[in-house]
Image (cartoon, rainbow, N blue to C red):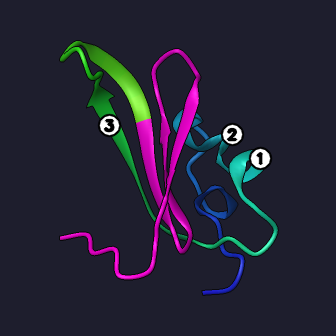
Amino acid sequence: MQHKHPEDGSRPDDSALAGLRSQLATHENVLCALTVDLSPQLRFQRGLLALTDQRLLSLDGDGVWSAWPLSDGTEIG
């Protein structure tokens, strides 16, 4: 997958994907993205998780992005 990001084909009503592109590095590819509706405090709040070939990105309900880099040998499963 080369530079194919979810917002390229996203539904107009899916505002959680709006800022994802601005968070990506030049050659970073989105592998999957998932909208969520629970905050870390277990309250209903819209957010986003996105897995790229380089890191895991999270958008919380307040619009704050967090990122965790993937290292060699990282397994998700």
**Callout 1–callout 3 Cβ contact below 8 Å:** no
Q: Amino acid at mark 2?
A: Gly
Q: Residue at x 58, y 22 (%)?
A: 63
The quarter in which the N terminus is drawn is bottom right
Q: Residue at x 27, y 75 (%)?
A: 75
Q: Amino acid at mark 1?
A: Ser
Along the line of sight, which residue is nearer the eye, 69 or 17? 69
Which residue bears the numbered disc 1? Answer: 22
| Residue 58, position as x, y percentages in the image | 47, 40
Q: Is residue 55 above or below residue 37?
A: below
Q: Which residues are magenta?
A: 48-77
The quarter in which the C terminus is drawn is bottom left
| Residue 51, position as x, y percentages in the image | 45, 62
**Callout 1–callout 2 Cβ contact below 8 Å:** yes
Please give left or right for residue 43 compared with residue 13 in the image.
Answer: left
Q: CA distance from mark 1 to mark 3?
A: 20 Å
Q: Residue furthest right?
A: 26
Please give left or right for residue 74 compared with residue 6 in the image.
Answer: left
| Residue 76, position as x, y percentages in the image | 26, 69
Q: Is residue 31 above or below residue 2?
A: above
Q: CA distance from mark 1 to mark 2?
A: 6 Å
Which residue bears the numbered disc 3? Answer: 36
